[in-house]
Image: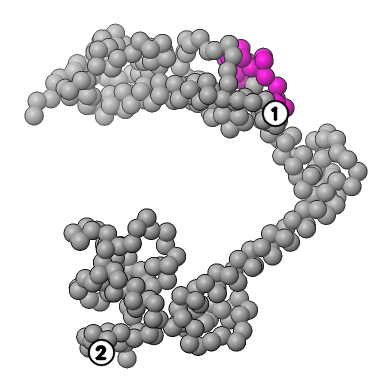
Amino acid sequence: MNFFKSSFKTETSNNPEDYPKIFFRWDREGKEYGPLWFNDMISRKWSGPPIEGRFENESIWREYSYFEEILNNLKISQEQISKMTKIGITNIDPNMSFINSIKTIEIKKEEFRKKREEEREEKAQLPATNQTIKKLNSLGIKYRENITRHEANELIVYHKDKEYLSEIFNFLKKNNLDFIEQLSLDSVLKGSVENLPTFDQFDELFSTMQSLLNFDIDYNYPNTINKDEMEKLINRLNNAEFESEDIEEQLKDREIMIGSNEFKVVGKLPRNQLIKIRTHIINKFLADEWNSDRDLIKVIEIYLPEVNLKEIEY
């Protein structure tokens, strides 16, 4: 018979199966979280303990310390015994504590993780397979005799990254980013030069600039660049794109906010004119000459002369 369903009692059981799951909350009038079980009180990475909890079949809220006391007195559960058996733990003490059983299971799992990692490392040091050697040859990659699987895979990854970075460099050169001429693919990939932009930064810049291809961008890119300047450039381009995109979405939604006033957008919105508006905004933003509250009405008048803005009064 379920301990709590039989009748309300002040004493507690040390059998985990006697308890339903628990809802917790961190504020007495706040949101409740759950249902959770006692093992969650150990495994969950809470920033701080809950204030109180209640069993899911009760409406009574109790101090968190009440559930901590139960947890500290629980013995191993049947579910934990099954887990231990599955992972090869023998001679299980039926009176082991609930908390110690969790620790025992985690220790065993950690042993398995370490063993798998050692096996992966051993496998990585084996000679490269015939298939991998064929791959190296097909890519024209030079390699040492008796190369290991790990070394071969690293060479293949490096080769593919270099090809991709070369594509990025060519794209940036075509778009007048002259600082590319001062950089080498290997120095970026190896990170051999201090404060040089990283592979990930070039990847992000490439992605950002590709999303701006529909717009005629007129911007003087820097002649030299380092890691910090690259981050600023990426953020600048992203912010310019976001500003223009946000205004386009407001126009399409037929309601736009200018300063503290909201306007209804009435009239046709030709796609080519929206692109011109976005291009205008991006270029002005990049030149530090854009102020939405000051400039937006004028821009709409220029590119969407048939559109009327009707102020919404609340």
Work out whether residue 300 can be spotted: no
How crowded pointer 1 is (Cα within 10 Å; few <14, some 14-19, many 20+) is rated as: few
Image point 42% across, 59% down: which residue? 45
Percent position of residue 307, x then y: 23, 15
What count of labels does the image hold?
2
Image point 56% across, 29% down: which residue? 201
The residue singled out by tag 1 in the image is 192
User: Of all residues shown, which one is farthest toward the left?
Assistant: 314
Q: Determine the secondary structure under disc 1.
A: loop
Locate residue 292 relative to residue 126 in the image: left or right: left
Percent position of residue 225, x then y: 58, 18
Quarter location, residue 133: top right
- Name the amino acid, label 1: Ser
Q: Would residue 180 be counted in the magenta stretch?
A: yes
Label 2, label 1: how many angstroms apart (C-alpha)?
71 Å
Locate residue 42 relative to residue 28 in the image: left or right: right
Q: Sequence order check: which comes first, mark 2 or mark 1?
A: 2
Q: Would residue 268 be counted in the magenta stretch?
A: no
The residue singled out by tag 2 in the image is 6
- Quadrant location of the N terminus? bottom left
Start and end of the magenta stretch? 170-187
Percent position of residue 181, x then y: 67, 14
User: Of all residues shown, which one is farthest toward the right?
Assistant: 145
Image point 80% across, 35% down: which residue? 139
Image point 28% across, 17% down: which residue? 292
Locate residue 289 relative to residue 227 in the image: left or right: left
